[in-house]
Amino acid sequence: MKRILLITENLGSGGAERQICGLAAMLTKAGFPCRLITYVENQFYEPYLRINGVDYELVKELWNKKTRVWRAASYVRRYGADVVISFLPSVNKTMCLAKLLFGSKLIVSERNNNTCITRGDRVQFNLYRMADAIVPNSHSQGDFICKNFPFLAKKVRPIINFVDVNRFTPAAEHRENGKLRIVTVARYTRQKNVLSYLKVARKAKEEGLAVHFDWYGDKLHHPDYYAQVEAEYQRLDIADYMTLHGPESHIEEEYRKADAFCLPSLYEGYPNVVAEAMSCGLPVICSNRYENPYIVEEGVNGFLFDPENVDDMLRAIRRIAALSSEERRQMGLRNRELCLERNTEDAFLKSYLKLINDII
């Protein structure tokens, strides 16, 4: 069987980390010799890896940027990997350069959508010439790469994110919250558009809408931005309408307590959290950018909005609030069905195994 090495920066609570840890667990369960390594200490998902028997190592020697490429190549050779799978931009660049020093096949994974093409993007995508395959987690990013970097088109193989449909299940019984409870799960970063969302909560308060917003996410990833969020939160006086939580390891329980899910991001790849919320039977409100219109059909399984327009965001909140409890339940049931059709672990693993067999 093929020997597989997976590498990313850390085991933080983000979506990319969730996907690579899940892939490592699937490969391990399927009997493949594989190992996952990281080099930045953030161990949120380590218990998950240990429970699933994944061979995991924190390789602190890769922390040094000056020697990272050489040390990464040495590690690949020592491990004897047939295939290396890397996640996240900085790791992808490292492994593309390291590929000059090892003979294993390399799969790089794109976890976000490009909003433009910077000088750094041009460097990165040209480095992808060294990779044997490029896996964007959305069809929209796959189209972007093929259009703007046609020399990479034959290497692009989109694989959308999986969700654990056995863990993320709908609530056994419908819960009446009194106020409509809308949950968001995302890091407190500029990309996630938190500051605009706070303004939505303020406008909802001014209108007297019977809603409460709960945001769960990592407050430490971008401390300067979170400081702005905290200051604005206090200034807007919305503690009675919105609660800012840290990350939650049993987030499925919070989904089940909610009436709807909202992700106001300015850009995304294929959002893990949207798939999780859908699998838990929640209607979804999210920005009308990139992959989201492929996932959410307006008025059928949720609502879309312009993330740069606070009034339009509030319009979507009003629409979900105006639905009856039964109408929201039917939207959620449709989302659960969609996840069972396209976001299963089995489909995700089969796509990766086919890709691995194709490039070796």
Image (tube, rainbow, N blue to C red):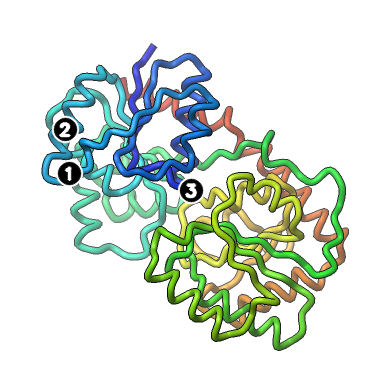
- Choose top left, top right, bottom left or bottom right for residue 170: top right
Q: Residue at x 43, y 41 (%)?
A: 43
Amino acid on which the number 1 mark rests in the picture: Asn
Q: Are marks 1 and 3 in contact (CB under 8 Å)?
A: no
Total marks in image: 3
Who comes first in sequence, dot 1 or dot 3? 3
Q: Can you tell which mark lies on residue 71?
A: 2
Image quadrant of residue 203? Answer: bottom right
Q: Position of residue 295 (x, y in %)?
A: 60, 53
Mark 1 → mark 2, Cα distance in angstroms: 9 Å
Q: CA distance from mark 3 to mark 2?
A: 26 Å
Secondary structure beneath dot 3 equals loop
**Which numbered disc covers residue 64?**
1
Image quadrant occupied by the N terminus: top left
User: Is tag 3's residue or tag 2's residue first in the polypeptide sequence?
Assistant: 3
* Residue located at (36% from left, 15% from top): 2
Element carrying mark 1: loop
**Residue 293 seen from this side:** no
Q: CB under 8 Å between callouts 1 and 2?
A: yes
Q: Nearer the viewer, residue 253 or 117?
A: 253
Q: Secondary structure at mark 2?
A: helix
Residue at 65 percent of width and 78 percent of height:
314
> Alpha carbon of mark 1 to alpha carbon of mark 3: how far?
23 Å
Name the residue that disc number 3 marks.
13
